[in-house]
Amino acid sequence: MNRTAAKLLLGVAVGTLSGCRRPPAPSRESTSACLEIDAPTAPVGFDAPFSITARVTCAGGRRGRIAWRQVAGVSLRALAIADDGFRLTGRTATLADARPGPLPWGVIPLSPRTRGEATLEALWNDGLGHELRREVPLAAAPRARGLPNTAIGARLYLGGEGWHLISGPPGSVATLQLPPGPANLLPDLSGDYRLADARGRELVLRAARYDETPLDCGRSGCHTAITDAAATSPMTTVLARGLGPAAGSSGPAFGPGYPGCALACHATGEPGLADGGYTQVASEMGVAADHPTRWEELPRSLRRLGGVGCLACHGPAALPPPAARAGVLRADVCAVCHDAPPRYGHVVAWRDTRMAHADRAPRTRSDRACARCHTTSGFLAAIGARAERPSPVQAEPIGITCAACHAVHAHETAAPPAALLRPPETAGPAALLRAPAAPTLLAAIIADPRASVDARSSVCLPCHTPDPEAPLPSASAAALWLGRGGLDPASGQPLLGAAVHAHAVGGCVACHRAGPEGLARGAGHGFAAPPTTCTPCHAQPLPPTDLTARARRLWETWRQVTGAVPVESAPAHASDLRVDRGTPLGRAAWDVLLVIEDAGAAAHNAPYAQALLAAAEPVIARAATRIGAARK
Amino acid sequence: MKWIACAVLTVLACRGPRPAPTATAARALPAPPPFSCVADRCVQRHPRLPDDGEWTCTDQGGATICVGGERAAGVAAAPGDPAFICGARRGAPSDPLGSRICVDPTPDLPDGARADWRCRIVSDPSARRICDREPGPWKLGAGCGAQHPCAQGSDCVAGRCALPRRMPDCWFDSDCPNHRCRFGSCGATPP
C-alpha cells in the first residue's frame, strides 16, 4: 500500500453555514460529479476519529491522486492520507478548541462556529491536466440552542461536573457519556431525561421528534396573536418564498440550487440526524429534501417543518420547566444559524459589543431599575413585550440579546414588517425590529412629522433616553441626538436644541453600523461608529472638542460644592447620588450629567451638548465661588 | 432468492395506487405518502390530513374523517388537501377537538384495493395511518346491491357504496340534533 504524507493546507476560513459554502471558482475540472466521497454525514463527536474515502467513477479515474486541504472551520487534527489520497483520516477538534472559554452549566449551546464544523476540499488530478474538486463538510456535534427541550437523535453536551442520569423515558437505552471527553447524552426516545450534577442540581431534558411535536401554540387563549402575526413573518415564510418562482422564471426565487444546503437554516431540524426534522421526514417520504419543489406541492408533513417556525427556536417536545424558559432569550438560540462567520457574522459582531455584556455586573440583574436596560428580560418587560418573569437563567449574564431588538414573532414590529435596522442599500425583509412606544422625553419630537425621525431608531430610544423623573440622568445618547433632555437652570423649563442628525436615514444605525471586518453579513451588529462614518457628509474631519473633559470638570466642581462623595468605578447613574432638579444648581448638574452620560455627545449633537454646558457652567461657578468665599 | 428479495422489497415499501379522486377535487392530488408494510399491516407514517393544522382523525367504513382546524403555528400558508371535503362542525362544541370537519372519501390505501384494508389513524404522538389487510364488503367503494347494503350514511350508487354529496358537519352524535353522525354528516337516520 502506498501511504504518502499529506500536504494539507489548513486554516483559511472562507465561509460556512452548516455545510453551506459558496462554490469555488470554476477551474479546469470537468465535473465533480464523478468524484464520489464517502464521508460522515452526521456529527462524529468532539476529538473523534473520522475516515473519508474517495473514488473517481469517470473513465480512467482510478489513476492519479487526491490532494486534500481544509478550507473552512476549526482545524482538524491528525490528518493523514493514504492510498494516493483516496483515503483520509483525522480527528475532529476538541470541544475546548471549537468553543474556547468557560462552558455554561447545563446544555452547552453550539453554533456552526462552535460545533467543530470544518470543510475539506478534495482535488483530484490525474497528472494529465484533468482535475476534479469536491468539498466535504464535517462536524463534531449537532447545533444546540442550549435549551433543555431537544430533539431525539441529537447528541447534547453538558457543562458542569459529575453528571449522572437519574431516569429516562420507559424503554430508553440512552446512556450518559462521561469524561475524559465532555459529558454528553444522545436521547433515543421521546420523554423526560432527569440528570443531576455532582452537587445534586437537577436538569430535566425533554426530548421528542420535531415532526411529533404539536403546533397548536395558537389555540384560543394561548398565543393567538403571535400565531396570527407569525404566519406571514419573514422567518416563517422563508422557505415558501425561496421555493416560489423567481420573477420571469420557473426556478426558485432564491436562485438555482435552492434550497440545497440552506435547509439547515430555512427548515427545522439538523440535516443528517434522525430527529424528525425536515430532511429526515423528506427521506422517510421518499422526497428529495434539497430539490426545489413549490411550497404548495410539498407534503403537509414537510410544510410543517419548512421555514423557521416555532420549533426552530423554541425546540421540540414539551415546554421546558418554568425555571428554564427564559433560556430562549439567549443569543445562543439565534446563533444556531446566525453564528456562521464569515458569511453570517451577526452573533460574532454582537459578542464584542457593550450590549452583549450589559448585565455582567450582578446588580444590573438583581436591581429592577438597572435590569430595565441592562437585561433582555428586564427590557422586554419594561416595553410591555413580555411579562416580568424573574428566572434563574437571568441570574446568569446573557447580555442584551437579539430578542431585545428583534420581535421574531412579528407582532410587535413597526409596520410594515420590513422596517429594518439596516442601511438602506442592504435592506431586506427580515429584521423584524420592535417598535416600542417613544420615551416620555422624546414623545413630542418623535411624533412631530417635521422632525422626521427614522422609525428604525424606536427600539434604541427606551434605553438611550434618560427618565426625566429619575434621580440622575442615564444613557442620554438619544436625548442629545434629538436635542432634548436639558433643563434651563434658572427657570427649570426644558432646554431644547436643534436635532442636527435627526434626519439621518436609518436613525441610529445610519452611523452605528460598523463591526468586525471580513463578515459578509451581520457586521453591523457591532454597532460601532468609527470616524469614517461621518465622512460622507462631513468632508473635513470634525474639530476635536473638549466636551467630555469640560463636563467632567464641571461635575467635579459640583461634587465639591455639594460635598457629594466621588463616584469611583460605576457610572454616575448607578450611584446613590441624586440631584435636586428643584434648584438651579441641581438643574445645572443634570445638564452636565447629560453630557457625561453620552460618550458620543460630540458626534451626536455637539451644539446641544455645548449649550447644556454653557447653561450649567455659570451656575456651578457661582456656587463654587460662594462656597469658596464662605470657607475663607 | 431474487424473487424473495423482490417480494420483501415490495412489501416493505409499497406505495399503492390511490383510487381516482372525487369530482370535487379541483387540483391534482400530490403523490401519496408511502406506506411501510410488514406482513398484513401497513403503516403510513405521514398520512394526508386536511391541511397543515392540527387534526384528530379516524377511519370509518373506508373514509377518513377528521375534526380540528386549529391552524399550525409558525407555518406559512398553503391550500388544503383537495382530497378532503370540509365543513363547519354543528353547534358550538364545548370540547377542544375543533370546529371543522373534513372527510376524505377515498383515502390512501397500501395497494388501492379498498375492500381489502381496514385502516385507522392514530394521533399520538403524531398522526400515523395503520392499515390491516382485512377483506370485507362494508366499505365505501365496495360493491353493493339488494343482498349487500351499504353502511348507514352511505348510498348504493351504480353498484358501489358512496357518500352522498353533503358538507360534513359532525364528529359526535351529540353534534346532531335528533340524528346520528355518520361519515361526518348528520344524516337523516333517527337515533
Image (tube, helix red, strand yellow):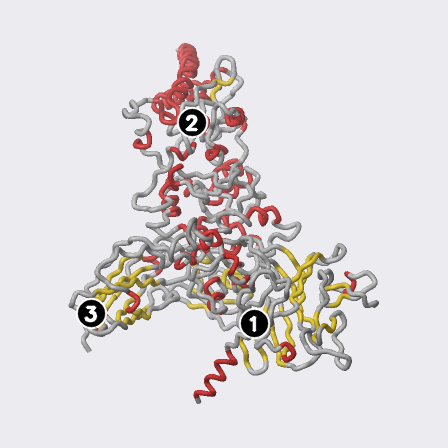
Task: Name the kind of residue labelled 3 in the image.
Answer: Arg
Q: Is residue A73 left or right of residue B39?
A: left
Q: Secondary structure at mark 1?
A: strand
The quadrant of the image that shows the C terminus of chain A is top left
- Return the residue found at the far bottom: B1
Q: Nearer the viewer, residue A227 or B114?
A: B114
Answer above or below: position of A616 versus A40.
Answer: above
x and y, in percent, of residue A255 in the image: 39, 53
Q: Residues within 10 Å of mark 1 (few under 14, many from 20)?
A: many
Three-letter residue code for mark 1: Gln
- Say which quarter of the image contains residue B63: bottom right
Q: If you read the primary sequence from the N terminus, does the residue marked by circle 3 or circle 2 appear first?
A: 3
Q: Which chain contains the residue that carries disc 2?
A: A
Pointer 3 chain: A
Where is mark 3, residue-wise? Answer: A65
Q: Name the disc covering residue B44, or none.
A: 1
Residue A617 x, y percent position in the rendering: 40, 15
Tell me the distance, in whole angstroms, between the alpha carbons under discs 2 and 1.
60 Å
Residue closer to the observer: A593 or A412:
A412
Residue at the limit of the structure toward the front, as seen here: B158
Which residue shows up at 20% across the image and 72% down it?
A84
Say few, some or many: other residues with alpha carbon within 10 Å of mark 2 (under 14 / 14 to 19 / 20 or more). some
Q: Give the quadrant of residue B78.
A: bottom right
Q: Nearer the viewer, mark 2 or mark 1?
A: 1
Residue with the mark numbered 2: A503
Rendered view: A574 above or below B50: above
Measured Cα–Cα span from mark 3 to mark 1 = 47 Å
Mark 3, other Cα within 10 Å: few <14 / some 14–19 / many ≥20: some
Quarter of the image where the N terminus of chain A is located: bottom left
